DNA sequence: AAAGAATGCGCC
DNA sequence: AGGGCGCATTCTTT
C-alpha cells in the first residue's frame, strides 16, 4: 500500500518581512504530494493552487505505481476531494486525517481500547461546502490546522503536507498498537471511504422532478401563495378549524393559542402534539367518534402545514438545482457515528414528496433498505444464538414473535415483538415494552445482558465503545458531582434522571453506533464493487450511489445495469456483515427495488 | 432587533 | 414513552 499525502506546500518564504525578498519555491496556496512508505516520508512534486487534478492524474505514472494500490491522504476529504470530482477524477481509496483523528482521540480516552495516541498536528473535521458554493483555490486546509508546539512548526508556522504525513504515521502506529487493530483499522478506513461516498453524493445529487413536486403541492395545498400568505387549502382548513373550535380568528400556527382553544373545546391535553391528540381521541370509549371528528382537522392541518413549511416551494427554490437535490452529508456527524446532513433536511425527506424523486429517462433508481439492522447487530455483537436464529430470515420481528409464542411468553405477535426489542435498545422504562422486558431477558439472555452492561456503564458515568471501536463521549466534567448531589429531594430526583438518561444513551450507543459501522462498510463495498465491475461490466458500472439514510441507499444508473446493481448491494450487505463479525451466523437481508420513482420502493 | 430556548414534526 | 438527528416557527430573553 502506497500512501500519498496531499497537503499544502510549505510557503516560499516566511517571517514578518514576507514578500520583501524574491520568491523562491511554490506560490502560496500550492499543493505538495508527499509519499509515505512505512515510516519513510519522501517529499514529492508540488502543484499550483488550481493544479491538484493534474498532479493527481500524473502521479501514478510518475511513481510507476498502480493507481489501485494508492491510498490518497487528505486533511479533509470533504474539502479536498470536490475539486478532483469537478475535474472528473474519482479516487479509489483514501484516508481522512481529520475523521481518523476524531475517532482516535476519543478511543484514547477509554482505557480498554488500548489506544495510545497523541496527535502531532491538530486536524479539525471540516464539513463540506454546500453544493454550488464557489470553491476557494488551493488547499482549503492551509490555515485550518496547526502543528502542536512540541513537534516544532514548519517554516511558515503550518505543518504542510510533510507534517500531515507525520500525523498519518502516528495514526497508523496508534492503530497497530491498539487492542483490536484490525477492527480499528477497518473503522478508520470505512469512515474515510464514507467521506469519499459523501463527497460523490453531494456532487451527483438525487434526481428531483420539480414539476412533479409542484404538482403535488398544488393538489394538496393549492397554488403557490404570495409571500406571507397561507396556501389556499391550508387557509380554508384554518378557518374551518377556528369555526369548529368556536374561536374565530384562531391562529393554529401558534401552539399556545391552539392549546387554549382545544382546552376550551374540552380537549384535555397538555400539549398540542399530534400523538397526544390521537391518544386523547382514542381514549374516548363511546365518545371516540366525536373526539376523532374534533381532533382530525387539527391533525390534518399540522400535516399540511409541515409539508408547506418544510418541503414546500421555498424548499424547492433553495435545494433543487438543475433537477438534483444535493445533500451535504456530515460523515460521523452524529456522536454515535451516524451521518448527519446539513441543508434541506436530507435525512428527513418525508414520504409525501418522494414521488418527485424520479430516475432520468432510460435510467433506474435502485432503492435498497436493510431490514431491522439494529437487532441483527445486537445479535451479532452479543453472539446470542437465539436472536441470531430469529434473524436468519427476512422478518426478524416475526421470528421473535414465533419464538416468544413457543416459549409461552407475552411476546406473541409481531407488533409486540418489535415494541419489546426497540424498547430494550432504547431503554424504555414504562409502557408496553418495559412490561415485556422480563420475557425478552428469558428469551435472549446474552443480548439483553450486553445492553444492560452498557447501560450500567453509562449510569456510572463511564464510556462505552462500538464493535469497531468508536467511543461514546466522556460525561461533562461536573457530571459526577451533580449526580452525587442528593441533598434535597429535588436534587435526588434530578440525579436519578441524569443517571438514567446517561444509561439510555450508552445502551443505545453501542447498537446504533455499530449499525452505523455496518452501514459504512456496506456503502464502501457497494462503491468498490461498482467501480470494479462484474463480468458484464468489466470496466465498472456507470451507476452511482446518490442518497443514504442510515440503513437505506439509493443508486441511480442505466436501466440495463439495474440487475447487476441489485446483486451488488445484496452481496455488499453480506460482505459488510462478514467484515465486522466474521463468520457469526447473522444475516443482513435487504429489500431491493429497481424503480422509476422513489415512492414505488417500500 | 437579535439571539437563544422551546415547541413540534419529519426521518431512522 | 424511550435513542439519535435537522429544521421551521413561535416564544422568551437579552
Image (cartoon, coloured by chain):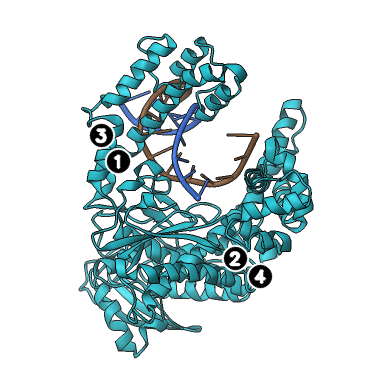
Chain colours: A cyan, B blue, C brown
Q: Nearer the viewer, mark 3 or mark 1?
A: 3
Q: Which residue is mark 2?
A: A587
On the image, the x and y values in percent for residue A379 come to 67, 60
> Separation of disc 2 and disc 4 at Cα?
9 Å
Tell me, yes or no, whether the two marked residues, 2 and 1, touch with CB atoms within 8 Å: no
> Separation of disc 3 and disc 4 at Cα?
51 Å
**Depth order, front residue of B2/A224:** A224
Q: Dot 2, crowdedness within 10 Å: few (<14), some or many (≥20)? A: many
Tell me, yes or no, whether the two marked residues, 2 and 4, touch with CB atoms within 8 Å: no
**Depth order, front residue of A57/A231:** A231
Q: Which residue is mark 3?
A: A218
On the image, the x and y values in percent for residue A561 come to 33, 70
Mark 1 or mark 2, which is nearer the start of the sequence?
1
Q: Chain of mark 3?
A: A
Dividing the picture into quarters, in which one does residue A7 lie? bottom left
> Separation of disc 4 and disc 1 at Cα?
45 Å
Q: Which residue is mark 1?
A: A315
On the image, the x and y values in percent for residue A585 come to 66, 69
Amino acid at each position: 500500500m502506497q500512501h500519498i499525502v496531499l497537503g499544502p506546500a510549505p510557503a516560499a518564504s516566511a517571517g514578518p518581512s514576507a514578500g520583501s525578498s524574491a520568491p523562491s519555491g511554490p506560490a502560496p496556496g500550492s499543493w505538495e504530494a508527499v509519499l509515505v512508505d512505512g515510516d519513510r516520508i519522501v517529499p514529492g512534486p508540488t502543484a499550483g493552487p488550481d493544479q491538484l487534478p493534474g498532479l493527481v492524474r500524473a502521479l501514478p505514472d510518475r511513481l510507476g505505481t498502480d493507481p489501485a494500490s494508492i491510498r490518497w491522504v487528505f486533511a479533509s476529504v470533504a474539502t479536498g476531494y470536490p475539486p478532483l470530482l469537478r475535474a472528473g477524477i474519482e479516487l479509489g481509496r483514501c484516508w481522512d486525517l481529520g475523521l481518523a483523528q476524531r475517532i482516535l482521540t476519543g478511543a484514547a480516552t477509554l482505557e480498554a481500547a488500548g489506544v495510545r495516541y497523541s496527535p502531532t498536528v491538530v486536524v479539525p473535521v471540516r464539513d463540506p461546502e454546500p453544493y454550488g458554493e464557489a470553491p476557494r483555490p488551493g488547499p482549503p486546509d492551509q490555515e485550518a490546522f496547526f502543528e502542536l508546539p512540541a513537534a516544532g512548526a514548519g517554516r511558515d508556522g503550518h505543518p504542510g503536507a510533510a507534517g500531515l504525513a507525520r500525523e498519518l504515521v502516528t495514526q497508523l502506529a496508534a492503530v497497530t498498537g491498539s487492542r483490536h487493530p484490525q477492527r480499528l483499522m477497518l473503522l478508520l478506513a470505512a469512515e474515510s471511504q464514507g467521506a469519499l461516498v459523501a463527497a460523490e453524493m453531494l456532487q451527483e445529487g438525487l434526481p428531483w422532478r420539480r414539476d412533479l413536486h409542484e404538482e403535488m403541492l398544488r393538489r394538496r395545498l393549492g397554488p403557490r401563495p404570495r409571500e406571507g400568505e397561507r396556501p389556499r387549502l391550508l387557509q380554508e382548513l384554518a378557518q374551518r378549524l377556528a369555526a369548529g373550535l368556536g374561536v374565530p380568528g384562531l391562529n393554529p400556527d401558534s401552539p399556545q393559542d391552539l392549546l387554549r382553544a382545544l382546552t376550551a373545546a374540552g380537549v384535555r391535553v397538555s400539549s398540542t402534539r399530534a400523538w397526544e391528540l390521537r391518544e386523547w381521541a382514542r381514549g374516548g370509549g363511546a365518545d371516540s367518534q366525536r373526539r376523532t371528528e374534533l381532533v382530525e382537522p387539527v391533525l390534518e392541518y399540522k400535516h399540511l402545514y409541515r409539508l408547506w413549511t418544510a418541503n414546500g416551494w421555498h424548499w424547492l427554490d433553495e435545494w433543487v438545482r438543475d433537477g438534483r437535490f444535493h445533500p451535504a452529508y456530515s460523515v460521523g456527524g452524529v456522536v454515535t457515528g451516524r451521518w448527519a446532513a446539513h441543508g434541506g433536511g436530507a435525512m428527513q425527506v418525508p414520504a409525501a414528496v418522494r414521488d418527485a424523486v424520479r430516475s432520468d429517462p432510460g435510467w433506474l433508481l435502485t432503492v435498497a433498505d436493510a431490514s431491522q439492522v439494529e437487532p441483527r447487530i445486537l445479535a451479532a455483537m452479543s453472539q446470542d444464538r437465539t436472536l441470531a436464529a430469529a434473524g436468519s430470515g427476512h422478518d426478524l420481528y416475526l421470528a421473535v414473535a414465533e419464538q416468544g409464542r413457543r416459549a409461552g411468553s407475552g411476546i406473541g405477535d409481531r407488533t409486540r415483538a418489535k415494541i419489546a426489542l426497540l424498547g430494550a435498545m432504547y431503554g424504555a422504562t414504562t409502557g408496553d415494552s418495559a412490561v415485556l422486558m422480563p420475557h425478552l431477558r428469558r428469551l435472549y439472555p446474552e443480548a439483553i445482558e450486553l445492553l444492560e452492561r452498557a447501560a450500567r456503564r453509562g449510569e456510572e458515568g463511564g464510556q462505552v465503545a462500538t464493535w469497531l471501536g468508536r467511543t461514546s463521549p466522556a460525561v461533562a466534567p461536573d457530571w459526577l458531582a451533580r449526580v452525587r448531589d442528593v441533598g434535597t429531594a429535588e436534587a435526588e430526583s434530578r440525579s436519578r434522571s441524569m443517571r438514567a438518561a446517561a444509561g439510555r444513551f450508552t445502551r443505545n450507543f453501542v447498537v446504533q453506533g455499530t449499525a452505523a459501522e455496518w452501514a459504512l462498510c456496506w456503502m464502501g463495498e457497494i462503491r468498490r464493487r461498482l467501480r470494479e465491475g462484474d463480468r458484464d461490466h468489466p470496466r465498472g458500472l456507470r451507476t452511482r450511489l446518490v442518497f443514504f439514510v442510515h440503513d437505506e441507499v439509493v443508486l441511480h444508473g442505466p436501466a440495463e445495469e439495474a440487475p447487476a446493481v441489485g446483486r451488488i448491494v445484496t452481496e455488499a450487505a453480506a460482505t459488510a456483515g462478514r467484515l465486522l463479525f466474521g463468520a457469526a451466523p447473522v444475516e443482513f437481508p435487504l429489500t431491493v427495488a429497481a424503480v422509476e420513482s422513489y415512492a414505488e420502493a417500500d
